[in-house]
Image: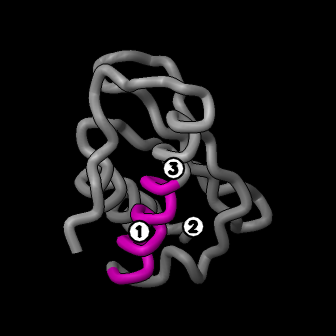
Amino acid sequence: MGNPNVQSRVQGILNEELNPYRCECEVLRDASVVVCVHEPESPERCLTVAGISDSDCRNEATVRQLARSIRDDLLALFERHGLFAANPVPRDES
């Protein structure tokens, strides 16, 4: 995923799937990926997911699966802390 076009495509899919939350992807030297999920219209970070392998980003289907996993993590985080996000986490419609 060192290719900036691939990184941009992955970030675009994550942003689409997790809308209204915003995602930023960063590729580390070891080729693993870090995804930071931010509150809508705020720089505040809700969740950081590290250690994502290159294989989790190899095609659209695996990236959408990654987005579902991140969505589940967001829901669990809000439920565990008794938080109610101003912008609800989008539910998986599939």
Look at mark 1 in the image and give the residue it sits on.
6
Q: How many marks?
A: 3
Name which residue lies at 70% across and 67% down: 31
Residue occupying the point 35% across, 83% down: 61
Location of residue 37 in the rendering, given as x and y in whole percent from the top left corner: 48, 39
* Residue 3 among magenta residues: no
- Tell me the kind of residue under disc 3: Cys
Q: Are marks 2 and 1 in contact (CB under 8 Å)?
A: yes
Residue sitting at x 61%, y 76%: 54
Residue 42 to residue 12: above or below: above
Image position of 49 (left or right of 10): right
Q: Which residues are magenta?
A: 61-72
**Would you say the magenta stretch is mainly helix, strand or loop?**
helix
Of 86 and 33, the residue lying toward us: 86
Residue 68, quarter of picture: bottom left
| Image quarter in which the N terminus is found | bottom right
Question: Does the magenta-highlighted stretch encompass residue 64?
Answer: yes
| Secondary structure state at the residue bearing disc 3 | strand
| Amino acid beneath label 2 | Gly
What's the CA distance linking mark 2 and mark 1?
A: 7 Å
Disc 3 crowd rating (10 Å Cα; few below 14, some 14-19, many 20+) is some
51 left or right of 20?
right
Residue named by callout 2: 2
